[in-house]
Image (tube, rainbow, N blue to C red):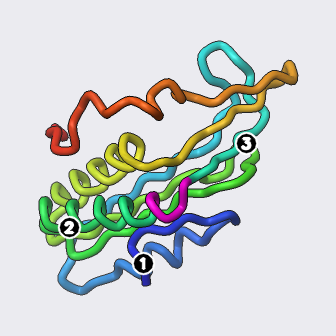
Amino acid sequence: MSAFRLSSTAFDTGALRAELADAGSGGFASFEGWVRDHNEGHRVVRLEYEAFEPLARREGELIIAEACQRFGLSGARCVHRTGALALGEIAVWVGAAAVHRDEAFRGCRYIIDEVKHRLPIWKKEHYEDGDSGWVNCERCAAAPAHGAHHAHG
């Protein structure tokens, strides 16, 4: 089963967590990114995510492998939604398991931060007033200022 996935439909976080169950792991950390109703003074009514799937999948798998190696994770998963999402839906889920909690927390944080910085996934917000806009798209064409190997403290 792939460690990184894109999904056009809602997914079962319990099943994802179960994929990481391991008797040798003493810690598990997860992150859920939810669709919220506001951003930068605008009332948001829904989101759309688009992805360049071949590159997103490949880079997502690489990020998971980096996290497992860097933090000694026994396993990790990430699922990112694509398509239209309503308020309150889960847009992204990350789970990380490790022998100890610190590694699980740090690995989970690394994965979500790198996914947000490195993957070709774009978010379009739809606002209450009928307007819409792509979020942080000026960053899409620019090289990341943080570099791929920044510290997560």
**Quick one: SS at disc 1?**
loop
Q: For mark 1, what is the residue?
A: 2
Q: How far is mark 1 from mark 2, CA to CA?
A: 14 Å
Q: Position of residue 31 (x, y in %)?
A: 42, 53
Return the mark for residue 68. Answer: 2
Q: Residue at x 31, y 33 (%)?
A: 144
118 lies above or below 60: above
**Quick one: SS at disc 2?**
helix
Return the mark for residue 74. Answer: none
The extreme front residue here reads: 141
Q: Answer with mark 1 or mark 2, whichever residue precedes in sequence.
A: 1
> What is the span of residues highlighted in magenta in the rendered image?
52-56
Question: Could you tell me which quadrant the C terminus lies in?
Answer: top left
Task: Name the mark nearer the viewer: 1 or 3.
Answer: 1
Q: Residue at x 60, y 57 (%)?
A: 81
Q: For mark 3, what is the residue?
A: 87
Q: Position of residue 75 (x, y in %)?
A: 28, 74
